[in-house]
Image: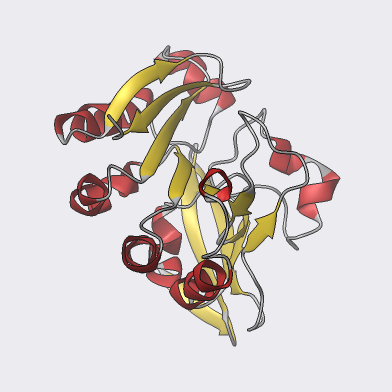
Amino acid sequence: METATAAGTSSRMSELNGSRVERRILERPAGGMPFSSQTKINAYNFPFTFNPGAGCFFKCAYCYLRQPFFQRHVQAGHGREMNYTPNLAAAAETFLKAREGLPQYMKRVQAGVSTELFMPQMLPYTKPDSLLKEFQKDGQTWMLHMVTKSPAILQYADLLAEMKSQVQVEVSFVTLDEPAAKIFEQGSPSVAQRLKIVEELSGRGVFRENNDDAGPEGVLVADGRQ
């Protein structure tokens, strides 16, 4: 059960490996911009990144979000707090209209690099469907690249199928061995749940290839471009 503890803040008790863990959700002050320009652009660094907030509840043992640079964005320990920028669709509209004159090769956004875009507890606050629809409406010439471990992305499978020419989805795995995954990704969805994402999005024509060189984790890349 989730209860309000302060303005823009909620707290929830949940189970993690048999222990009760308090998790907090905080709203960031209005006016923040979740889109950032990147100074280094290559195959793994897009011209822009997007994060709906900071923090993560999956609590993977190897996650770089545990480092002090990223922990400065949250008040509780790793895996216990997430925060979000309100009205992401409006922020996306402002971002897209301000950059509509960019050359095509610059119109690429990597989403969810410092948090989980489809964290189930965050969906009522971040409303990913409104963000996707804004890119569908005003960002049709943009490529939106999303990294996820969350089966909650399947709530938007129909919309992603409509947008398959402008979206890429990476489903992240550290291993396909279920017992090992429970050690390294103790709060994450199971391997079977994540493979279900691949299966369902593949059935909708979204997945294109298996990419084993995208980074330290193994990923499957969903890309609807022909």
Q: Quadrant of the C terminus?
A: top left
Residue 111 visible in the current orientation: no
Look at 26% across and 46% down and name the residue there: 154
- The furthest residue to the left: 203
Look at 73% across and 60% down and name the residue there: 74
Q: Give the percent coordinates (x, y) of residue 113.
A: 60, 44
Report the front residue among 124 and 12. Answer: 124
Q: Give the percent coordinates (x, y) of residue 198.
A: 28, 28
In the image, is residue 26 above or below residue 16? below
Q: Is residue 212 left or right of residue 128?
A: right
Residue 53 visible in the current orientation: yes
In the image, is residue 53 above or below residue 153? below
Q: Give the percent coordinates (x, y) of residue 43.
A: 61, 28
Q: Is residue 152 left or right of residue 26?
A: left
Report the front residue among 26 and 207. Answer: 207
In the figure, residue 81 lies in which quadrant?
bottom right
Q: Give the percent coordinates (x, y) of residue 83.
A: 61, 66
Q: Quadrant of the N terminus?
A: bottom left
In the image, is residue 176 above or below residue 78? above
Look at 33% across and 47% down and name the residue there: 153
- The furthest residue to the bottom: 7
